[in-house]
Amino acid sequence: MKLQTFWAGACSLLLALPASALEIVFKDGTVLKNAEVYVPPPNRFSSGGPTIFGVNLTVNGKLYIHHFPYVESAVTEETVDGDDDGIYELRKVTRIVTHYRPPVLREHAPREFGYSCTPSRLPFIHFNEPTLAKLKLNLSQHPLIAAQHRARLAGSIDLALRHKPQPHELHTPQTAAKWQQEADRDVRLYPQNIFYGKWIKK
């Protein structure tokens, strides 16, 4: 009996240990350090765990809310061989940053964080490829996620890697302004519960 109690306590301690922190990079260029994928403990009823629609992130135990900034295309001058004739010339090249508008799915944030305003779940298409690879590894090995669900998550990440942007999905200054107007207002009410993308120190 004592041995069983010891092992039960040891397992509880292991499950309570924090997950390994990740550096998350969004396609809009936002870099989020010390982030963790939120996976609720098995004894807690929660809608906030990873799904095929994306993940919730935490930073230092606080729920992360992304600000979905709009990134303008950058025009740079580059030396290029435009005609492939060995003659190089200076040309202006437009670099388009492919990034997506905020999620349409208006799912409530996990209520255990005491915040249910701005949606917090982040679809996988918003992350860059190295981050998707890290997320796939993290979720595929997570002990609190059932094996069959891990496979579905991995499949959803693979779809995000192969996703071809559609015109209606792309971010615009208007959608960024609308999202941030709402989020800026909401997050000010709960600074003790959440971490907002605009608060990242450059």
Image (spheres, rainbow, N blue to C red):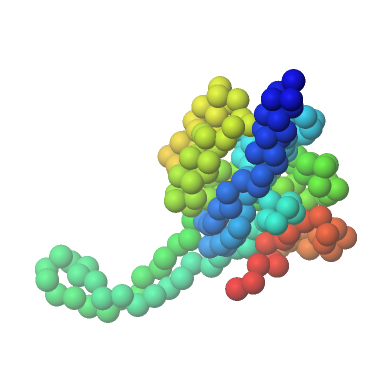
In percent of the image, x 53 and y 41: which residue is there? 138
Camera-nearest residue between 179 and 122:
122
Q: Position of residue 75 (x, y in %)?
A: 43, 73
Residue 145 in view, yes or no: yes
In percent of the image, x 81 and y 47: which residue is there? 113
In the rendered structure, the answer to whether residue 198 lies left or right of residue 113 reads: left
Camera-nearest residue between 183 and 78:
183
Q: How many marks?
A: 0
- The image quadrant where one finds the C terminus is bottom right
Q: Position of residue 154 (x, y in %)?
A: 50, 33
In the rendered structure, the answer to whether residue 32 lies left or right of residue 43 reads: left
Above or below, 163 against 42 in this view is below
Q: Position of residue 171 (x, y in %)?
A: 59, 55
Residue at the outermost right position: 189
In the rendered structure, the answer to whether residue 93 lies left or right of residue 114 reads: left
In percent of the image, x 70 and y 67: which residue is there? 199
Residue at the outermost front position: 2
In percent of the image, x 77 and y 56: which residue is there? 194
In the rendered structure, the answer to whether residue 141 lies left or right of residue 114 reads: left
Above or below, 82 against 104 in this view is below
Residue 172 in view, yes or no: no
Q: Position of residue 59 (x, y in %)?
A: 68, 56
- The image quadrant where one finds the N terminus is top right
Camera-nearest residue between 118 and 195:
195
